[in-house]
């Protein structure tokens, strides 16, 4: 995993309830404060768990998706979809 400072900072900052409220109300305005790479910004806007998992601490990632309102079972499902499939041709 290659950590991205600005993504981690966004996720860290969103642990504060007032920041969550502001983010839910105007995600684009809040994102302007963070120098995210274009591909990371696009992944944030798309709620792309798989893409963001490559750049973030798993605990911050999970909290971020909780903070933006994604249900835990949906988040876990997206993580499971990332897992490599076993080869049944042994």
Image: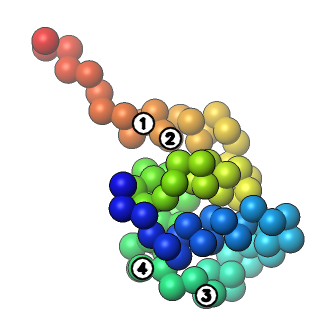
**What residue sits right under mark 4 in the picture?**
37
**What residue sits right under mark 2 in the picture?**
78
Taking the image as shown, residue 24 lies to the left or right of residue 32, namely: right
Q: Please state the horizontal and vertical placement of residue 12, each as a whole percent of the image.
A: 66, 65
**What residue sits right under mark 3 in the picture?**
32
Between the C-alphas of marks 1 and 3, the distance is: 30 Å
Kindly state the secondary structure of the residue where label 2 is placed: helix
- Of circles 2 and 3, the one toward us is 3
Contact (Cβ within 8 Å) of mark 1 with mark 2: yes
Kindly state the secondary structure of the residue where label 1 is placed: helix
Kindly state the secondary structure of the residue where label 3 is placed: loop
Q: Is residue 69 above or below residue 30?
A: above
Q: Please state the horizontal and vertical placement of residue 89, each as a whole percent of the image.
A: 13, 14
Q: Nearer the viewer, residue 48 or 63?
A: 63
Taking the image as shown, residue 47 lies to the left or right of residue 17, namely: left
Between the C-alphas of marks 4 and 1, the distance is: 25 Å
What residue lies at 73% left-to-right and 56% top-to-bottom? 67
Which sits earlier in the primary sequence, circle 4 or circle 2?
4
**What residue sits right under mark 1 in the picture?**
81
Q: Please state the horizontal and vertical placement of residue 8, each as a whole percent of the image.
A: 55, 67
Which sits earlier in the primary sequence, circle 2 or circle 3?
3
């Amino acid at each position: 995993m290659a950590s991205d400072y600005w993504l981690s900072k966004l996720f860290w900052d969103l642990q504060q309830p007032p920041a969550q409220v502001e983010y839910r109300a105007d995600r684009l305005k809040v994102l302007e404060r963070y120098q995210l790479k274009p591909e990371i910004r696009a992944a944030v806007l798309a709620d792309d768990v798989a893409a963001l998992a490559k750049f973030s601490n798993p605990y911050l990632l999970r909290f971020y998706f909780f903070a933006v309102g994604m249900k835990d079972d949906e988040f876990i499902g997206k993580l499971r979809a990332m897992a490599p499939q076993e080869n049944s041709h042994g």
